[in-house]
Amino acid sequence: MMTGGTDPVNRSALEFDRVSMVFPDGTEATLDVSFSVRPGEFVTIVGPSGCGKSTLLRIASGLLEPTGGSVEVDRQRLGYVFQDATLLPWRTVQGNVELLAELQGYTKVERQALAMAAINLVGLQGFENHYPKMLSGGMKMRVSLARTLTLRPPVFLFDEPFGAVDEITRMSLNEETQEIFKNEGFAGLFITHSIGEAVFMSTRILVMSARPGRLVAEIDVPFDYPRKPDLRFDSRFAELSGTVSAALREAHT
Amino acid sequence: MSKSRTPARRRRIMAIDVAGPTLVFVAFLGFWYWLSYYGMAERRRFLVPPFHEVIQDGYLDWKNFSVMLEALWLTTQVALWGLGIAIGLGMTCAILMSQARWIERSVWPYAVALQSIPILALVPLLGILFNYSFNARVIVCIIMAIFPIINNTLFGIQSVEAGHHDLFTLHHTSRLTRLRKLQLPAASPVIFAGFRISAGLSVIGAIVGDFFFRKGDKGIGILLDQYAARTTTIPRLYAATILAGALGYLVFSLFGLLTRVVIGKWHEAADVPG
């Protein structure tokens, strides 16, 4: 059961409550992190490399047990897009997209329908029978996104998914992701160290300090969805990017 | 990275594939004839009969050739049974070892020991224990062939990427599902590499067991032993040796082909020469 705000309409889908993580080797990854994400919110955490951003997602998903604090989230229906596409090379695009539904026990017919819809959403029609070795980095990431979309998760975790693709591909993946977010209305938690990416997609940005990672700033992003590509050249976009950048710099020193 | 070869490049590879080995064969044959007619001291020349005599005596004389084929068939059966059992037993062992650290720790030293004992040291023992039977020969093959299966299966299963494991963990996958849908497919290229090595070893095991048993049904190993005993059968010794080599090559190639059929579509390095 989820807890959160007292107002049932505004109750959060994902809530971090004073989460701290100290690894067995003594590394302090995160310190006292508290925040929540409500349905229809797209929250992005930006911070320098190694500040424990990914650790937060691993804790949220249950892959990692925090040493302090707790996370409230429905883990049965959690979408997790990893840093790598983590496609199974022996499966075709279709087979990879069907995987999660398969693990959840859906029938073959249901799986195929779910996969087809997800493949259409990320624009990979025609590539169903390709093996991952024949795909580019951006396409692999699309398959990974589609795989997670099949289960229609109400909470979506993104662990720096577009960090390894080129700038142009990254921008179009950003546009597609916020398009999907607009249509699906999930609660999104996105990790990145790209300020442009954060401002373009999010409703809210959290800035994290260097290790041990603490939340040091919270910045609302007021732009309406769907966001058009040329929003990136809007003066308000630049201004907001400047604010995030300043907060990051401050956190770093 | 996709390996789409242009037709021209494919043709060039085909040409090399035929011309290269042919050239090596011709050179080898030249050396052989040189040995037969000039290279060896005259009183020892009977030890290297010219190639055509080997063909005539060994393969074109049906009386001799049928004896060899029969022996070869027996050896093939021994090798395939041994390989089959080694694959079943070895993979079962490795899968069990991958499921629990204590099983791995308990079994691994014996797998290594089995691999380290020279097979010749075991042959006499296995001979008397199993009365030089077909089964005794199969056991020699299993001992020869099982280690690469255990080693490669275990290594393959343990080398699955952490990210893939996370993906399955997030969906609360059972051990069996994880094994079937993740670990075994991910390990299959390494497992197939083990099969190819074991296939060759199994053929060697079948011949070695046979050769040193010197008893029971005649496999190609016993024939080799008998042909080596008399000067008149020396051409047949060469003929039988070539057959034994061909058998090993054939089994190895079959597994290369199997590898390409099973994992060739998705695996980068499945382009193994066969």
Image: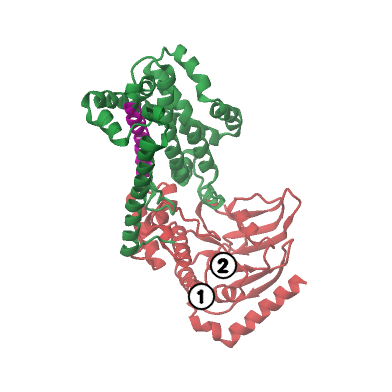
Q: Amino acid at mark 2?
A: Gly
Density class for disc 1 (Cα within 10 Å; few <14, some 14-19, many ≥20) is some
Span of residues in magenta: B235-257
Instruction: Return the x and y of residue B256 as percentages of the image width and height.
Output: 38, 43
Residue at point 47%, 16% (across, down): B126
A13 and A213: which is toward the camera: A213
Instruction: Return the x and y of residue B79 as percentages of the image width and height.
Output: 38, 28
Rendering colour mode = by chain
B254 and B110: which is toward the camera: B254
N-term mark: 1 or 2: 2
Between the C-alphas of marks 1 and 2, the distance is: 11 Å
| Residue matched to label 1 | A171
Chain painted in green in the figure: B
| Relative to A228, residue B36 above or below | above
Q: Amino acid at mark 1?
A: Met
B204 and B100: which is toward the camera: B204
**For residue A66: magenta?**
no
Density class for disc 2 (Cα within 10 Å; few <14, some 14-19, many ≥20) is some
| Relative to B234, residue A10 above or below | below
| Badge 1 and badge 2 both on one subunit | yes
| Relative to B77, residue B213 above or below | above
Instruction: Return the x and y of residue B41 as percentages of the image width and height.
Output: 42, 31
Marker disc for residue A144: none
Residue at point 31%, 63% (across, down): B7
Marker disc for residue A163: 2
Subunit under mark 2? A
Q: Quadrant of residue A114?
A: bottom left
Identify the residue at the far right of this view: A253
| SS state under label 1 | helix
Residue at point 34%, 36% (across, down): B246
Picture colour for chain A: red
